[in-house]
Image (spheres, helix red, strand yellow):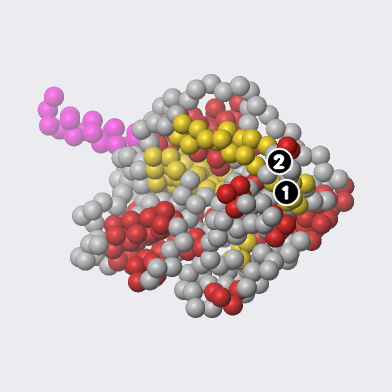
Amino acid sequence: MSRQRRLSSAILITIFFLCNYTYLMKSFTSVEFGVDLSILPSLLKTTTTKTTTKTIATDYHYSRNTNIRNETTSSEEAISTSNILQEKFLGNKSSSSRVGFHIFRRPEVTDSIIILGERHSGTTFFTKYLQDCFPNVTVKDTLINNKHWLQPDPERVEYLLNVVNSESEADDETELSSWREIVKNGISNKNQKSNHLRKYYFENSLVIALLRNPYDWVEAMRRKPWHWPEHISLFPLPAQNSSIKLQNIGSGGSSIQKSFVGHTLLDWKEFVDRPLYLRGYDEKQDDTRRVCQKGYPPNTTSPCQRNARYAPNQLKVIPEIFLRHLQFGMNDPIYEKNQDGEPFQNLLQLRAMKLKNLLSIPERWELAGIGFIQYDNLLGDRLKSLVEQIGRIIGIVDECRVLPHFEKKPYNISVEFTDWITKSAQWDTEKLIGYHPFV
């Protein structure tokens, strides 16, 4: 073929491609994920196609960014090239639901899957299940703090490291390991600006925030108010009525826990009216502390200092050795306060603050992606579909074992209780995670 004919053929192929670009893009787009394939490197303007999966009634957004930050890229260049999709996500200030997966970049290897969420959102089950499904991927339930608690900013992490290195205020060394590791790896390179590097620590991580509707969540907290000893009635049991629990301690071992403590649930009215702080705790003793438990700032938790051996007054007749395993973590209390350092008026105000904290994680940390997933997607056949989607995101086929079909019906709560939740919930925040008032 002559040079002129080859040139003509190339021109015709180029014209055909440009004329049929839209059709080709649709042909290469995953119907289930709404994937945008950036075929031409020059096309940095990527868009997402919203679609609804067959088994999960939520929108899943997926996009690919061709310019991924690497170690040879300066931090300023990285911000301008690798965050296009993340900035687009953050730029969406509408009140539309954020439910679904939002993938900002595709790393060659996903470092970790991080499961976060409030108590009673399925985090314990889902973390363990994904560990079985993806044995070669690190699946954990800690970003900076453990899954249930507020996640701090990168600047806060550096401050926390300075505090724990300069004085012995650490209540739990295991809680500080992630702070040290992040700052050590994030700001050790003196050739680049540390304030840019810190936020990239999780750039190859997929964060999944599990969410539950406010009606079932409040009732679940009433039934098992984890770490809230003021919101359940605890009392000593006679020896003949004590209960025995077999506790798995790992490596095939187990221990027997004998409980001399009984409990009864509070009526819903009393439960929601109980103050959200630890009564009888002298907060003046914390005036000189620079950090509270779990890295919280001073005057933002009650109690400030962790007390993993706490026991309510009514249980102090029982020897301390028998109070190590109180129900629902009651011997490790923590009540979070509002931004003014005051107790929340009710638990739905606390919930709204923590939801906003989860929603803002992409504003503070660079991520491979984040998913806001409703609790119902862990049930029935939807679980299999969800895990398959995670596998496609990280590029790994899951090895999940088949679980018995499991459905969980909504709690049957009274009309009055339902009305209270409807009136007390902050629906501007709830609708961002796909929840609306019962009609």
Give 368 or 151, whichever is nearer the viewer.
Answer: 151
User: Which residue lies at the image location 68% right of the left edge and 68% below the top edge?
Assistant: 280
Which residue carries the number 1 mark?
236
Q: Residue at x 20, y 55 (%)?
A: 72
Return the residue nearer the eye: 48 or 341.
Answer: 341
Amino acid type of the residue tagged 2 in the rendering: Ala
Q: Residue 236's x, y, as percent?
A: 73, 49
Q: Residue furthest left?
A: 2
Left-right relation of 243 to 108:
right
Mark 2 residue element: helix
Which secondary structure class fits the magenta region best? helix
The image quarter containing residue 396 is top left
On residue 239, the disc is 2
Question: Given this view, does label 2 or label 1 mark the residue nearer the observer?
Answer: 2
Magenta-tinted stretch: 1-23
The question of residue 88 being in magenta is answered with no
Rendered view: 200 above or below 305 = above
| Image position of 181 with respect to 375: above or below | below
